[in-house]
Image (cartoon, rainbow, N blue to C red):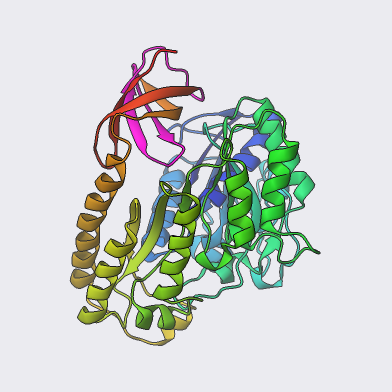
Amino acid sequence: MKINYYSLGCKVNLYETEAVLNEFIDNGFKLVSFKEKADVTIINTCTVTNTADQKTRQMINKALRNKPKVLAIMGCFSALDYMEIIDDNVTQVIIGTSERSKLYDYVIKALEDKKSFINIKKPLEIDVYEELKLSRFVDKTRGFVKIQDGCNNFCSYCRIPYARGKSRSRAKDNVISEIQDLTNNGVYEIVLTGINTGNYGKDLDNYSFSNLLEEIVLKVKGLGRLRISSIEVTEITDELLTVISKYPKHFCNHLHIPLQSGSDLVLKEMNRKYDTNYYYEKIMKIRKYFPLINITTDLMVGFYNEIDEEFEKVKEFIKKVEFGEIHVFPYSRRKGTIAYDAKKDLKGDLKKARVQDVLKINNELALKYQEKYLNQVLEIVIEKNEKGICFGHTSNYLKVEFKDKNGKVGSLVKVRLRELGYPIAKGEVIEV
């Protein structure tokens, strides 16, 4: 039988989709592209923004047009709004952000019985980490390894804690075992991911995220490089920085640290746990450990109390920090959040203009950071080879394009950075 999928949203979703696909493929299913007709289609949904909701509905409708025997839907959108996606014209399996480990069994039963099955657990009542296991990635060269789920922060604009539940950590032995399996299968870069990755260990007895990182380095044989997908500034401790600095061979020279706003007034209204001074001082401390590290971030513009004066502060602050890359997006009111109840919003055109203002600054900052590496030799994991034109990321998360007709996807190559460019710089392979 044939299976295809579409995974929306974050790296955690990618991991969960891959883990589910592993079980189907291990049981004889053939993976085909999303455009092709398949017996089973899986959609992993996202609800982080209004745009994510729209894309989720759009991809479900696309899947319905191909008329699979079973349409399986999981993820954050279905956890909160599953009633919107029930369709009597197709056999469906709908779950939320739990029961992923049982999805294969649910789908097989639905195929046999030709009856839809819906099982939505209330996310805020889930307090145990659901183990999903994978030993290979069907569709990615970097190995995303989920170490944590859920979030306790409840930022005023965010639905994710309501969709994912409380923060809970994965057993360390399972994390290490999975990384070893992926490493044995030739995955050079491991990306540790979670809904609130740096919160790992807070629910465990006397065991921290720093402890996990050191244990991975010491126990995984043949480990390549290790990247932390994202970490809150409040989770960056001296202990963590010390561990990373001890093993420069393994840890990527890059941290993604969400800012969300460069205005203290806005940060307070967002229910973030820091102000701009705290954030800046922490970045300065990180740069004392790692002077050339690439700090990237997420930034939300157009929050309802971001008046013109506050947006000017945002622009000044991001210039002051000198991020290597900024993922900017406009605020959207999310039903069920604290901010939604404020019943305030800025005009859409103003938000779009502010996104463009930040993108302009982002381009300047990205090129300024890249300039430090012009004509330097960097190691890159090849992620794509399109007729001899290869693409990949450096340890410090620069995306580089280079020619290598023999470049093998997943392999590590040395490339000299020859031409600045954002979002993609250009380089040339160094023959070893």
Q: Is residue 373 left or right of residue 239?
A: left
When the figure is inspected, residue 211 is found, relative to residue 48, above or below; the finding is above
For residue 397, say whether it is visible: yes
Instruction: Identify which residue is drawn at 69% across, 26% down.
Output: 184
Q: Position of residue 280 (x, y in %)?
A: 41, 67
For residue 117, say whether it is visible: no
- Magenta stretch containing residue 160, yes or no? no
Residue closer to the observer: 109 or 296: 296
User: For the N terminus, which image quadrant?
Assistant: top right
Residue at the extreme front: 288
Instruction: Identify which residue is drawn at 36% across, 19% down.
Output: 429
Instruction: Identify which residue is drawn at 49% across, 65% down.
Output: 84
When the figure is inspected, residue 270 is found, relative to residue 419, above or below; the finding is below
Residue closer to the observer: 40 or 190: 190
Q: Position of residue 395 (x, y in %)?
A: 46, 38
What is the span of residues highlighted in magenta in the rendered image?
A: 387-411
Q: Position of residue 423 (x, y in %)?
A: 29, 42
Residue at the extreme bottom: 342
- Magenta stretch containing residue 402, yes or no? yes
Instruction: Identify which residue is drawn at 31% across, 83% down.
Output: 305
When the figure is inspected, residue 410 is found, relative to residue 285, above or below; the finding is above
Q: Is residue 317 left or right of residue 64?
A: left
Residue 250 position by quadrant: top right
Q: Position of residue 176 (x, y in %)?
A: 73, 42
Residue closer to the observer: 363 or 319: 319
